[in-house]
Image (cartoon, helix red, strand yellow):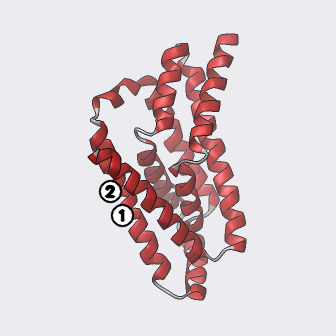
Amino acid sequence: MGHWLLAFVSAYGAVFLLELPDKTTALTLVLSSRFRSRPVLAGAAVAFALQSVIAVALGSAITLLPARVVAGAIAVLFGVGALLLLRESMAADAGDADAAASSTRAGVPFLRAAMVSFGTLFLTEWGDASQVTAIGVAARYASPVAVGIGTFLALMSVTVLALLVGRKLRSRVPAHFIQRGAAAVFGVFALLAAWQAIF
């Protein structure tokens, strides 16, 4: 039991600390500005459950992918995301943009919002530092269930925190400012990933 608990705490602590300042938090903030919290949470739960299983059970497959290919794909995804967010934030003036964001959040069906959240978060986590960390912890402790549960709960904890922060931000900061800030963060992530892909 002590070995299981140690594996769980190690996985949870390492992944939580890695994810808190990571792109997943920024992405969850963006998703919460576009969709209601429940479908984002549902999509995230399925994405992170799958990622945790993959990280623990099939983690060795990650090492077969060339690091530059993974970094290049991430750079393109974040670059496109940054451009789309920037375009959306400048499409209308501040008042219209905020009203449009509110109506968009309310009007998107649950299943669609959950599927978009799932796809985005699942792809973002692929090959991420938290996934690699989960692989390492699983290899060290040889307790895949504990590592899988710890990894999943850490990812969900960060997601819930980001959703709570997103809710508070929406009530105090205009939507177009959140979108521009997220676009800047995405741009930085795209440049960092491009740097890794090239060098």
Q: Residue at x 28, y 34 (%)?
A: 65
Q: Position of residue 45 (x, y in %)?
A: 57, 44
Q: Position of residue 138 (x, y in %)?
A: 51, 20
65 horizontally vs 59: left or right: left
> Considering the numbered disc 1 on the image, is that residue within a helix, a strand or a loop?
helix
User: Which label belongs to residue 140?
Assistant: none
Q: Residue at x 54, y 62 (%)?
A: 30
Task: Using the image as rendered, state which of residue 193 and residue 142 is in the foreground.
Answer: 193
Q: Residue at x 47, y 34 (%)?
A: 131
Residue 50 visible somewhere in the drawing? no
**Residue at which label 2 appears:** 76
- Image quarter for residue 122? top left
Looking at the rendered structure, the kind of residue marked 1 is Val
- Image quarter for residue 164? bottom right
Q: Position of residue 93 (x, y in %)?
A: 53, 88
CB-based contact (under 8 Å), mark 1 and mark 2 = yes
Q: CA distance from mark 1 to mark 2?
A: 6 Å
Q: Position of residue 73 (x, y in %)?
A: 31, 50
Image quadrant containing the N terminus: top right
Image quadrant containing the C terminus: top left
Q: Residue at x 38, y 56 (%)?
A: 191
**Residue at which label 1 appears:** 80
Looking at the rendered structure, the kind of residue marked 2 is Val
